[in-house]
Amino acid sequence: MPSASTSTQSETTDQPANKLERKRRILLKLLTALLSTFICVSILFGIDLYLHYKHGINLRGYRGPSLGRKQPGEKRVAILGGSTTWGFGLKAGQDFPAQLQTMLAQDAAASPATRISVLNLGFNNDGAYSFKFTLKDYEYLEPDAIVLYSGYNDLNEPNYLVYRHRSPVFVWTGYFPLLPSLTVDKLTVWKRELAGQNQKTIFRPPDPNKIGTSPTLPEQVGALTQNGQQSLESYGAACPPEWQFYCHQISQAVDLALKQGRRVLVVTEPYISDKHVAQQQALRNMLGARFAGQPKLRYLDLGRTVDLRDGSLCWDGMHLTEEGNRRIARAMAPAVNELLQP
């Protein structure tokens, strides 16, 4: 029969072994959790990289190649706007900022020392309110000229969306993850469709068999008639109450760009409705009154450059085809070239 002292010695010997086994199990669980987390993060990051590649958006959150330090002799043009700037429904390179860069490069071919880079800083649903944030976010790119291309996303209620700022990762680091934003957008649309709460037109990538104006678009932005231009003359120099928010946001963006030392070109998009014509007339009046005599500011009206009813130029009543974007780039090129002159 074992003595009490023998039993005590056995228990004392087992305690270090049990502690070691417990530590080993905890360490194994920790390593398993870390490995699982690493695999999940790697998969999600891989999907995010694929989405960046698919949509032609670099990791810094703008379309096209990511630019580094500005090179000697290089001139940069940053274009801000919504989905019509970004090139919704088109491949990267078909959007008008990319086509504009090609045209400007051809114009500058006689001067090999000058390289012109055009930055597409537009994003879906962004309106005039977002411009001052975008100017600050990408100030490090040191653009020489700023183009503000807007109107459609500010035709109804005040638009406070700053798409990139929905991501705290972008705000903190400058890296823009696409996967979370696109997932939230999809879920929001599905939820509204199921609940029958979608009042806004939902734009989808172009279908060659279904080219034409979305049936709900005129309900949202109104129709374009021959009387639109005539009804604006009575506004005078003041910005009507309906457009004060929009005019104020453009004014703030122009002020900021000028303070940053940039030259600015404010551009009117192709007219989509009488309401849009009125909005842009109010904008012109505001610019003329607020920035009269400002040598670094130009205005360009492209309202009649493209007929949005032409299916070869516009596939949904708002977003332009590759050819439509080419016409915008061609019409904009002389004004941008002038803006870049010493």
Image (cartoon, rainbow, N blue to C red):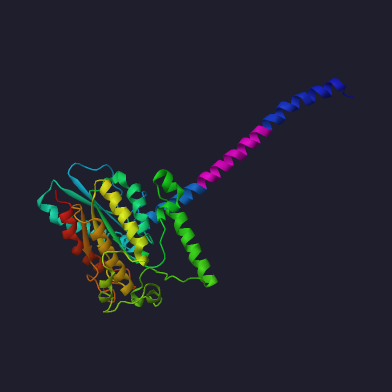
Q: Quadrant of residue 34?
A: top right
Residue at image point 23% right, 67% down: 302
Left or right placement of residue 17 versus residue 256 in this view: right
Quadrant for the N terminus in the image: top right
What percent of the width, then of the height, locates residue 142?
26, 45
> Which residue is more in the foreground, 315 or 167?
167
Q: Residue furthest right?
A: 1
What percent of the width, then of the height, locates residue 19?
70, 30
Residue at image point 42% right, 52% down: 165
- Residue 3 within the magenta-colored segment of the rendering: no
Left or right placement of residue 267 versus residue 111 in this view: right
Q: Residue furthest top?
A: 5
Q: Quadrant of residue 5?
A: top right
In the rendered image, is residue 283 in sight? yes
Total count of labels: 0
Left or right placement of residue 223 versus residue 144 in this view: right
Specify the segment rendered in magenta. 22-39
Q: Quadrant of residue 298?
A: bottom left
Residue at image point 40% right, 53% down: 164
